[in-house]
Image (cartoon, helix red, strand yellow):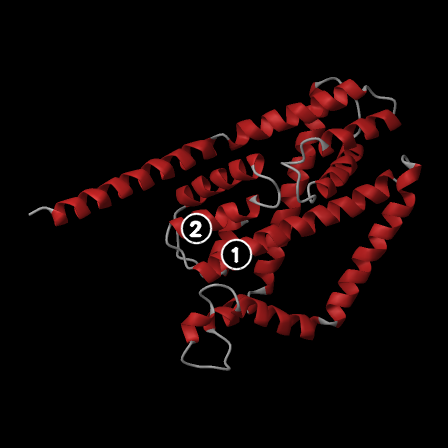
């Protein structure tokens, strides 16, 4: 998905190995940083590598908006699917579905104004307006590139986002089976949808605490062990941590490279001052 966004926003071409390292580093940052901070991790990495600020920021924001959209889709589906099991969320599920449908309808009806707002917002991104500073009153080339993204590209990155969420839900199902809890695949996908909504809380760290709370509530409703629910939550965290571990290599590499550059610059400056 990121490779699609990277190309769509006109960022400088990069090999697959670079994209893989960047993704692992971003995944690790997502794991250890609060939700309110971790969206900046990929942007920081791109800026370190000399990518243009405006395009990098726009691509990073788009990535997080796609995550938000996929979480909302699975959250709505999960809420509706579990409404018969959890009587208390019937109205929550209905209300959430109405809000999402109404939001889509309002967004479509006001697409012209939203387009104008998007132009103004993009023009304010750092480095965007500087490209056409000599042409006041005109839309910058970068803004035109961003707003003219191919619809097929937009559809592909949205499908990638849904596939990513479904993969995470499938992982939760297999973890549940691995600890001997026999629950259906559709039930666990629905539960993950509720967990996905909890991931949107700005102060959570990779859903720690909220994920376990959702699992305990879900398991209690179907007469399954709450201890197993807590174990599944912790095991999920461990597996995600193992999967993100290669990102540590990239962060260490960047730290050492940055330190080496600073030492080299200091040595050059020192030699320049020598008689």
Find disc 2 in the rendering and name its residue. 46
Which numbered disc covers residue 86? Answer: none
Which element type, helix, strand or loop, lies under badge 1? helix
Total number of numbered discs in the rendering:
2
Across and down, in percent, residue 78 comes to: 80, 41
Across and down, in percent, residue 194 comes to: 77, 39
Across and down, in percent, residue 59 comes to: 52, 56
For residue 150, which quarter of the picture? bottom right
Viewer-closest of 226 and 127: 127
Q: Are marks 1 and 2 in contact (CB under 8 Å)?
A: yes
Q: Is residue 241 left or right of residue 193?
A: left
- At x 53% / y 68%, what residue is drawn? 124
Find disc 1 in the rendering and name its residue. 59
Neighbourhood count class around disc 1 (C-alpha, 10 Å): few under 14, some 14–19, many 20 upward: many
Viewer-closest of 77 and 40: 40
- At x 49% / y 42%, what residue is drawn? 23
Across and down, in percent, residue 128 comes to: 47, 67
Viewer-closest of 227 and 127: 127
Mark 1 and mark 2: Cα distance apart in space: 10 Å
Residue 274, compared with residue 167, is above or below; it is below
Residue 47, compared with residue 260, is above or below; it is below
- At x 62% / y 57%, what residue is drawn? 155
Which element type, helix, strand or loop, lies under badge 2? helix
């Amino acid at each position: 998905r990121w490779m699609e966004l990277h190309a769509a926003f006109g960022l400088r071409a990069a090999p697959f190995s670079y994209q893989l390292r960047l993704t692992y580093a971003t995944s690790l940052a997502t794991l250890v940083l609060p939700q309110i901070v971790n969206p900046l991790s990929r942007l920081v990495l791109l800026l370190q590598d000399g990518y243009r600020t405006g395009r990098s920021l726009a691509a990073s924001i788009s990535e997080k908006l796609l995550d938000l959209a996929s979480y909302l889709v699975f959250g709505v589906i999960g809420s509706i699917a579990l409404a018969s099991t959890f009587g208390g969320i019937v109205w929550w599920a209905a209300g959430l579905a109405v809000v999402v449908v109404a939001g889509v309808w309002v967004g479509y009806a006001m697409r012209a104004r939203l387009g104008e707002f998007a132009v103004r917002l993009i023009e304010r991104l750092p480095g965007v307006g500087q490209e056409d500073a000599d042409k006041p009153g005109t839309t910058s080339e970068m803004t035109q590139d961003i707003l003219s993204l191919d619809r097929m590209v937009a559809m592909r990155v949205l499908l990638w986002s849904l596939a990513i969420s479904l993969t995470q839900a499938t992982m939760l199902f297999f973890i549940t089976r691995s600890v001997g809890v026999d629950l259906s695949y559709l039930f666990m996908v629905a539960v993950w949808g509720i967990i996905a909504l909890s991931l949107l809380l700005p102060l959570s760290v990779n859903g720690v605490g909220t994920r376990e709370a959702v699992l305990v509530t879900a398991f209690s409703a179907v007469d399954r062990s709450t201890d197993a629910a807590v174990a599944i939550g912790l095991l999920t965290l461990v597996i995600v941590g193992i999967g993100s571990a290669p990102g540590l290599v990239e962060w260490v590499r960047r730290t050492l490279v940055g330190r080496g550059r600073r030492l080299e610059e200091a040595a050059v400056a020192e030699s320049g001052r020598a008689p």
